Amino acid sequence: MRQEINHWFLNLDTIRISFAPKKEGIFLFKHINYIIESKNRQTTVIRRYSDFWWLLETLGKRFPFRTLPSLPPKRLGVGDEVFLERRLRGLTRFMNALMRHPVLRDDPLVVSFLTEPVELAIWRKNVVVSTEDEFTSQLPISEDLSGHVPSNLDVQLEVIKTRLPALVDYVRSMVHVMDRIQKRTEATAADYMRYSLAIHALADCERQCHLNECYNCEQLSQGYNKIGSHMNKTSSILEEQAKSLQRSMVEDLKRLRDLQISLMELLQRYERSREAGIIETLRKRITANETKLKAVQASAVAAAAAAAAGGNQDAGDLSAFESQIEKVGASIASDRVELEVLLQRVVLQRYTLWMEITYFHKNQALIATMYQRFVQEQTKTSQSLRDNWKSLSPIVHDMPMEVNGFN
């Protein structure tokens, strides 16, 4: 079991999603198609946004006690460029979250979503998609399954449930701040580019001095051009840093936030599950019917004894007692079978919950990787900026600075 768990994060598939070239539909009902590429499977398919929603809804029925990733929100019409880019990144996080999950990534429906070359709507018409939950095919369970569930699972769940809201709030705040840092870096890169263009234009103006014999103004103009080139390079460095922040740190934080929210929603679904109430109802009904059965059996025995003693008890009364005993007994047997199935489903639910919080906990190891990548990128950017400014230093020091040189 432990060895199997340790293989969860090996050989993970990577999904890349991009916009298809053309929009389809008319007017407000135009929609965008998405090209989905699977690295491991070497497949490329085209899907609509509604296909993603259908996939999530179906997975929700099949895997009600799994950490299902969330999708970016719906919106009528095509939307602006910023919204579409945000949705594209959300869809990419959704698919890669499915690929990271040790169970969901191998579900036949997910595999078909990534590999069927035809439109999903056409494919759905030609196949029967089961919406039975995963537990149906796992019954009856092995006797030792409950032994794999920690005895303190309820305590663990309570601790997680208490901590999760605060964790989600903190990570949401971190996402917001890092997103602002990314946008400020992007804006700073754009400002350096504007400055570069302006100083190049200034160099053209300064090249022609009002004094024909002025050599220093021409040198100053050359210095302007070199400063502008370094400003332009600074812009490129910062622009790459902004892109790197978006690709890595911002998206990594959003993945962490999405996973926390998915686990919180899973625990809420578990609390709302109706098995516990049905089990209690069945147990009460079985107890009541067992009491009733004993009473009917006692009455039948008394009636049979009276008939044997020559009383006036007829065969019809005895037959009625037998019919009632059979009916109550059948009801008890049916309820016991249903109760056993529900008890086994509860064991499966608890085992699944334990697996999901184990999966959640193992994802914590990715936080170190996230910050390692962030620090590496920051170091790389800082070094590039330092080298750029250092190479500009002798150039600006060689620019004419003596007042007497501008006579």
Image: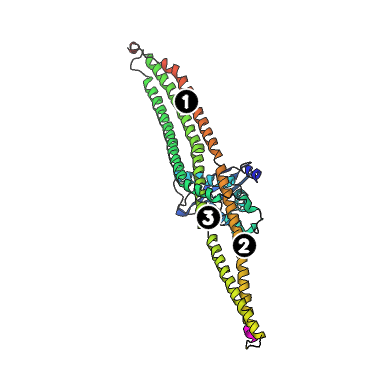
Residue 52, disc: none
- Residue name at image x 46 percent, y 30 percent: 238
- Dot 1, how many residues are within 10 Å of its Cα: few (below 14), some (14-19), or many (20+)? some
Q: Is residue 126 left or right of residue 245?
A: right
| Residue at mark 2 | 340
For residue 357, above or below residue 343: above
Measured as percent of width and height from the top left, residue 333 is found at 63, 69
For residue 202, above or below residue 56: above
Q: Mark 1 and 2 residues: CB-CB less than 8 Å, in contact?
A: no
Q: Residue furthest top?
A: 404
- Which stretch did the figure color magenta? 313-317
The color scheme shown is: rainbow
Between 356 and 62, the one nearer to me in the picture: 356
Quadrant for residue 303, please give it: bottom right
Per the model, the C-alpha gap separating discs 1 and 2 is 68 Å
| Residue at mark 1 | 385
Residue 45 visible to an observer of this rendering = yes
Sequence-wise first label, 1 or 2: 2
Residue 270, disc: 3
**315 in the magenta segment:** yes
